[in-house]
Amino acid sequence: MSQLFACTVEELPDGEARKVEYTPDIALFHYNGEFFAVGDRCSHGNASISEGYLEDNATVECPLHTASFCLRTGRALCLPATDPLKTYPVVVEGGKIYITV
């Protein structure tokens, strides 16, 4: 496993998300001071999760068909999605955000 530099903490304000280019792409979220990384493709409709809607309780809603996912576990929380998103460990060191891939 290796560490992928995503961005600095300053570049990702709380309540925001960004796509991290990798193969496959990763969605990085900042929610209430915590950082979460999940696969950037909805398991149902192949939409970009980083373009989704960050909601309460560290969840994200897919912008295409409103499926919701838990950012902590990747678990699909409602239909139409049933398969989870892949999750990635996130490390913050010296103001820089790294994703373990």
Image: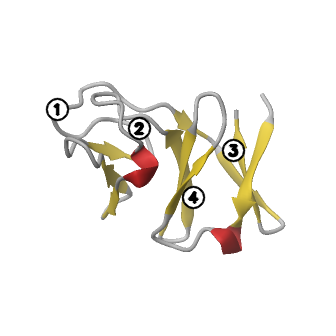
Task: State which mark lies toward you, 3 or 1.
Answer: 1
Question: Can you give x and y, in whole percent of width and height, for residue 7 in the image?
Answer: 72, 59
User: Looking at the image, do the residues carrying marks 1 and 4 touch, with CB atoms under 8 Å apart?
Assistant: no
Callout 4: helix, strand or loop? strand
Q: Position of residue 6 (x, y in %)?
A: 71, 52
**Mark 1 highlights which residue?**
80
- First-in-chain label (4 vs 3): 4
> Between disc 3 and disc 1, whose residue precedes?
1
Residue kind at label 1, given as amino acid type: Pro
Residue at mark 3:
99
Looking at the image, is mark 4 or mark 2 earlier in the sequence?
4
Q: How busy is the neighbourhood of tag 2: few (under 14 within 10 Å), some, or many (20 plus)?
A: many
Q: Which residue is mark 4?
A: 35
* Residue 10 visible, this angle: yes
Q: Residue at x 19, y 41 (%)?
A: 65
According to the picture, the residue beneath numbered tag 2 turns out to be: 74
Residue 47: where, in percent of width, then height?
A: 36, 38
Q: Amino acid at mark 4?
A: Phe
Alpha carbon distance from label 4 to label 3: 10 Å
